Amino acid sequence: MKVCVGLSGGVDSSVAALLLKAQGFDVFAMFMQNWHNTEGTLHGDCEWEEDKYVAELVARKIGIPFYFVDLSAEYRQRVVDYMFDEYAHGRTPNPDVLCNSEIKFDAFLGKARELGADMVATGHYCRKQQAPDGSWQLLEGIDPGKDQSYFLCRLDQEQLSRAMFPIGGMLKSEVRELAARADLPSADKKDSQGICFVGKVDLPVFLQQKLTSVEGDIVEVFDAWYADSEKYAVDAALLAAKQPCELSDEELEELSKPLDYSNIVFETETYRSGRHHVKKTRNKPNPWGVVAGRHEGAQFYTIGQRKGLGVGGHAHPLFVLATDIEQNRIYVGEGENHKGLWRRVMRIAPDELHWMRDSLAMAVGQERRCRCRIRYRQELQNAVLLMRSSGLFVVFDKPQRSITPGQFAAFYALPDPSDKWDAPELLGSGII
């Protein structure tokens, strides 16, 4: 069997190639370049060239053919343009998830097959196995700190059938040790960070390639707003009084809606200041909030963000609670336990749902216990999935911090507690 390894220059894909070669597969490596523009990036202009150089050295060390492919046009069209559009509409996308489904296991897979590959292998920490019905299951990797199944939550059965994950059954420490023993050039290379194939970025600068910077208000929300909010009180009462399966469609719909802070308005007043009594304008005090600062554009911020706000004078950090693109406002709260950061219910539209296997799809009216994560490396959270005609509602057992529109939620089967190496199956995913 001929296998193409997506060799990135990192230690994980290097060990994947090493293992496949040792197992007797007909292996070749291919390095893909997906990004040329360095505007807004926080690394040197030639980082991809260094990665390519290391990847070539690894291929030579292992003794496998090496190829190069430029997929930058496909990456811009399918990943980056989508990313810009999502931010423009006030949502926070996850480009790494799209990179896997649209580039690594689509465009890259196509190029690999042109070169005769039957399968494509990557250095992802996850596993796959065949179910009794012949379909392919995607499982977490056994390293709890490195599982990357979340990033593969949009793959379909055809893509999974062509995928190999040679290091999914290993710990990261074992991968490093094996690379060192084999004297691979990538053995000590640090893990990549930031946006897939772009790297670490100054997000506002990066997004300003297409999105216009317009100043607006940063509004700090006080506890008094929640005390006076009818929706906040009704939502809390509903969740305290009813089990998830007892909630009506209308109640689930209402619970899934984010809090709306647009009723925090500021009246102005004039006053005279200084020796010369210069007339100035200021906001009247408002018990619900205060204009705490200014920002460069609401589309550059995301729920839960704490860095880059530029507002001081607080005992605890400020976090973004919500963004309002139309009014160009962002709302913030002080402290990681601020009431506006936490929610228990979210909704996924029917056309944004993706099931890893057809047999896992839920019909309207069905419910399922599962575990869920709403961001990479988040510990899996217990939840109930409720399928309704208007979409899939996820009701968490405990409130979750910073549920963010545009991000991916991934659902996992409940694990077998008697097996410490049992890795739950990734059931499906959806865009929040």
Image: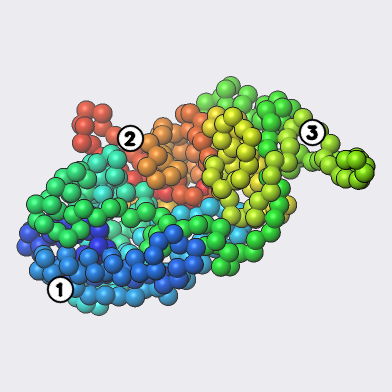
Please name the amino acid that badge 2 sits on: Leu
**311 vs 28, nearest the viewer:** 311
Left or right of 44, for residue 320? right
Q: How far, Cα to Cα, is label 1 from label 3?
A: 68 Å
Is residue 391 in view? no
Q: Are marks 1 and 3 in contact (CB under 8 Å)?
A: no
**191 vs 322, nearest the viewer:** 191
Q: Quadrant of residue 73?
A: bottom left
Q: Are marks 2 and 3 in contact (CB under 8 Å)?
A: no
Residue at 29% x, 34% y: name it. Answer: 415
Give the labeled residue for mark 3. 286
Helix, strand or loop status at disc 1: loop
Residue at 42% x, 57% y: name it. Answer: 200
Mark 2 or mark 1: name the one nearer the start of the chain: 1
Q: Residues within 10 Å of mark 1 (few under 14, many from 20)?
A: some
Q: In which quarter of the image is residue 422?
A: top left
Q: How far, Cα to Cα, is label 2 from label 3?
A: 47 Å
Q: Residues within 10 Å of mark 3 (few under 14, many from 20)?
A: some
Is residue 394 in view? yes
Helix, strand or loop status at disc 2: loop
Give the labeled residue for mark 2. 414
**221 vs 351, nearest the viewer:** 221
Residue at the front extreme, as displayed: 275
